[in-house]
Image (cartoon, rainbow, N blue to C red):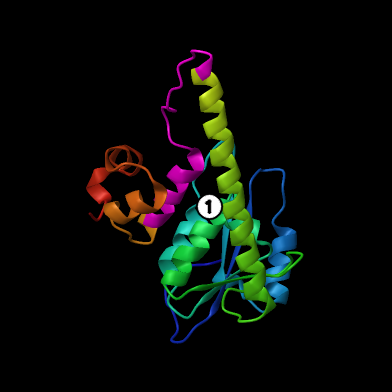
Amino acid sequence: MGTGNDHPQGGMELGYARVSTTKQSLERQLDALTAAGIGDERIYLDKKTGTTVDRDGLKALLAYARPGDTIVVHTLDRLGRNLREVLNLVHDLAERGIGVRSLADPLPINTTDEGMGRIAFLLLALFAEMERTFTAERAAHARAVAEASGRQVGRPVAHPEDKIEYAQLLKAQGDSLGVIAAKTGIPKTSLHRYLGTDQINR
């Protein structure tokens, strides 16, 4: 599987496969990537065990990918645990000149395409933004109801696990502490704790 060593000149397709439990199999994803013409040496894998959230395969892939490359996945949800995380990652990759293509989504995604593949991705982004708005409105309503009944409304102590993992991925691709804080909404003081200050490029 992916080694992350040499990188030939010119854009290339890199595969990524992930399962979230030890009971799931990577076989279907690997078969699809192989059928798409991606060799084993260019496929990166993550298979979680227990409650770990580390995705070393994805971190290695992000560190290896270069402008002009395209990351290919069986379905887009393999890149993250929720739509917002996936869209953030795809956006960051686009800023680096790296495309994303899915093979088996109902509307296959291809961010390098000017046709339906691109339109499908933009629709996903629109739905995610709508959900973010609805979530914010529900939260505001809940706060208003709580305050009206005299209950204290506090902020959550910890940051969501998916945001912490996203911060770790940004660190893996070389983003500075300030950039990571801006993209994740996690304060620098918390990032010091989550990521380790001695290895962060400020």
Most foreground residue, 31 or 80: 80
Mark 1: which amino acid? Answer: Glu
Mark 1 crowd level (few <14, some 14–19, many ≥20, 10 Å Cα): some
Give the tally of numbered discs: 1
Most foreground residue, 26 or 92: 92
Compared with residue 68, is residue 77 higher up or lower down, i.e. above or below? Answer: above
Report which quarter residue 60 is drawn in. Answer: bottom left
Most foreground residue, 57 or 101: 101
Quadrant in which the C terminus is drawn: bottom left
Secondary structure under the numbered disc 1 in the rendered image: helix
Compared with residue 147, is residue 119 higher up or lower down, i.e. above or below? Answer: below
Can you give x and y, in whole percent of width and height, for residue 150 in the image?
Answer: 49, 12
In the rendered image, residue 135 lying in the magenta stretch gets the answer: no
In the rendered image, residue 149 lying in the magenta stretch gets the answer: yes
Quadrant in which the N terminus is drawn: bottom right
Can residue 17 be seen at all in this image of the molecule? no
Single out the residue that lies furthest toward the top: 150
Magenta-colored span:
148-170
Most foreground residue, 37 or 78: 78
Report which quarter residue 100 is drawn in. Answer: bottom right
Q: Residue at x 65, y 72 (%)?
A: 119
Can you give x and y, in whole percent of width and height, for residue 162 in the image?
Answer: 50, 44
Q: Residue at x 46, y 45 (%)?
A: 163
Q: Residue at x 58, y 57 (%)?
A: 79
Residue assigned mark 1: 85
Single out the residue that lies furthest toward the bottom: 10
Can residue 132 be seen at all in this image of the molecule? yes
Can you give x and y, in whole percent of width and height, for residue 192 in the image?
Answer: 28, 41
Q: Residue at x 61, y 60 (%)?
A: 126
